[in-house]
């Protein structure tokens, strides 16, 4: 992975020195342990103010084709309410800024969040970069 990290200019026509460096990384399916390893590799880049990390997710993929159809009719009349609640709980887990908390959320609810592994890697990188002091950064 270290050799796969590259920089690109962020704005067309701007000198590279004035543009943030973008680190394009494709993250597939990783175990929490591997997310920790990759996060540790990326931690120094987190601390570089000239580097920008963008992690994208459209959250819950619900339906038969995704093998995920969570619905708690005792709490929510409509399926979309269950999905909104799941996504909200996932965002809270991310905002808590602990990789373990996010993994626990995923295991507890079996949610198929698209982008869960890049999110996990970023949370791990932040944890390593700031030695677990979640008060030093925002997500």
Image: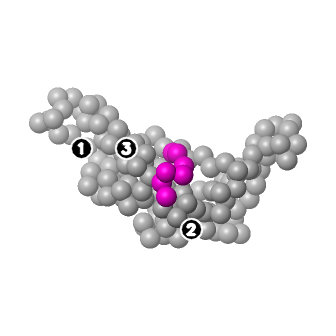
Q: Residues within 10 Å of mark 3 (few under 14, many from 20)?
A: some
Q: Residue at x 37, y 48 (%)?
A: 93
Q: Secondary structure at mark 3?
A: helix
Q: Give me the C-alpha separation between circle 1 and circle 3.
A: 18 Å
Q: Earlier in the sequence, mark 2 or mark 1?
A: 2
Residue 105 visible? The answer is: yes
Residue 108 placement (x, y as % from top left): 26, 55
Image side of residue 41 versus residue 21, left or right:
left
Q: Which residue is mark 2?
A: 40
In the rendered image of this protein, does residue 134 appear above or below residue 41? above
Q: Earlier in the sequence, mark 3 or mark 2?
A: 2
Residue 94 is inside the magenta segment = no
Residue 62 visible? The answer is: no
Residue 84: quarter of image: top left
Q: Secondary structure at mark 1?
A: loop
Q: Residues within 10 Å of mark 1 (few under 14, many from 20)?
A: some
Residue lying at the far left of the rendered structure? 74
Residue 75 placement (x, y as % from top left): 15, 35
Q: Which residue is mark 1?
A: 70
Q: Secondary structure at mark 2?
A: helix
Image side of residue 45 versus residue 16, left or right:
left
Residue 87: quarter of image: top left
103 and 133: which one is in front? Answer: 133
In the rendered image of this protein, does residue 18 appear above or below residue 51? above
Q: Nearer the viewer, mark 1 or mark 3?
A: 3
């Amino acid at each position: 992975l270290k050799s796969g990290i590259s920089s690109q200019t962020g704005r067309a026509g701007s000198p590279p020195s004035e543009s943030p460096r973008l680190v394009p990384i494709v993250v597939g399916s990783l175990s929490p342990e591997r997310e920790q390893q990759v996060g540790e590799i990326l931690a120094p880049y987190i601390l570089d103010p000239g580097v920008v990390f963008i992690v994208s997710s459209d959250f819950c993929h619900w339906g038969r084709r995704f093998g995920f159809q969570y619905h708690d009719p005792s709490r929510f009349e409509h399926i979309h309410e269950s999905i909104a609640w799941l996504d909200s709980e996932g965002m809270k887990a991310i905002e808590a800024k602990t990789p373990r908390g996010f993994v626990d959320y995923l295991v507890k609810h079996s949610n198929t969040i698209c982008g869960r592994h890049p999110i996990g890697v970023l949370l791990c990188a932040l944890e390593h970069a700031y030695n677990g002091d979640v008060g030093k950064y925002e997500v």
